[in-house]
Image (cartoon, rainbow, N blue to C red):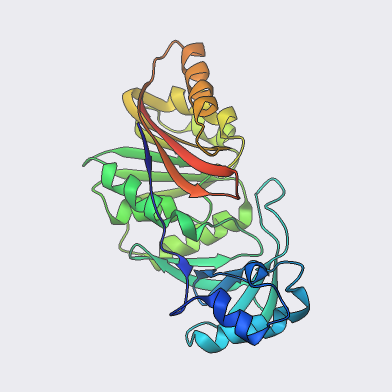
Amino acid sequence: MVTSRQHSSFQKPQGSLRQILHNQFPEIPQARLPGGFDRVGDIGVVGITPEAEPFESEIGAYILKQNANMRVVAKRAGEYEGEFRIRPLEVIAGEQRLTTVHRENEVVLHLDLAQVYYSVRSSHERRRLAALVLPGERICVLCSGVGPFPLVISRHSEASEVIGIEKNPVAHGYALKNLRANRRLRNVRFYEGDVLEVLPQLEPGFDRILIVLPYGGERLLPAALQALRPGGSLHFYDMQAKGCHTATLAKVKAASLALGRDILVQQVVRCGNCGPSVQRVCLDGVC
């Protein structure tokens, strides 16, 4: 079963932003102007095509003018890169900063978009996962970043314990800060380090494990399956070509068979587009 989730983070003014900008900058082909932007706290993150680059400051200033609570507009200046999957951003209007405070799913998140990975477009997916959690579950989130999955799960479920493991020391520092900012959530713990080193040191028998690493999460599958109790739930995120999830299924089945475990795949959820031909999927299964 393959399902799909929509996100609501792509902000558009009344009418079409692309049409309005075309009226302001008629020399740029309309199709090459921004059609919207992602809003993270008081920062708007926008894509700027090469044709629009000579006017990017004016485009950013216009977006600020139309959004009273926004203080920064930044453009995507490259693809996600490096071990921690950081996307380079460049401020084109407003205050010269990439730090902000974002609110999603009744959780407060402090962020530095220059140093941590965070996807505002996964907010619905985080709430979806929280809704699956049964009372009393022990949960572990692998590659938990600044903590959005553990904190949202804690806020919207009756889990007994939610653990996050993150290798990026900056992201881990923000996770601890976010835990303090959401001080009502008392069942969350964050650990800094490589999942393959930290997870085996924790008490096994988790009821639910999430592998939220955007790329390369299959290397964590053996450790995750060993820490998961029999009958526990696995949520494995992967990037695949649109309309195709056979490779994701193959990765999880190979890892489970190597450990003498079997996996019952409940569904594969499409939970975000990452370009014209790539989508993010989540395999929900029981091992």
Query: Residue 141 at what x, y percent from top left?
Result: 45, 42
| Quadrant of the rendering where the C terminus is positioned | top left
Left or right: where 20 falls relative to 30: left
Of all residues, the one furthest to the left in this rendering is 135
Point 39% across, 15% down: residue: 262
Query: Residue 86 at what x, y percent from top left?
Result: 66, 55
Left or right: where 54 falls relative to 97: right
Point 64% across, 86% down: residue: 24
| Quadrant of the rendering where the N terminus is positioned | top left
User: Of residues 14 and 215, which is closer to you in this image?
Assistant: 14
User: Of residues 95 and 161, which is closer to you in this image?
Assistant: 95
User: Of residues 236 and 279, which is closer to you in this image?
Assistant: 279
Q: Is residue 287 visible?
A: no
Point 57% across, 49% down: residue: 274
Left or right: where 190 falls relative to 162: right
* Rendered view: 240 above or below 153: above
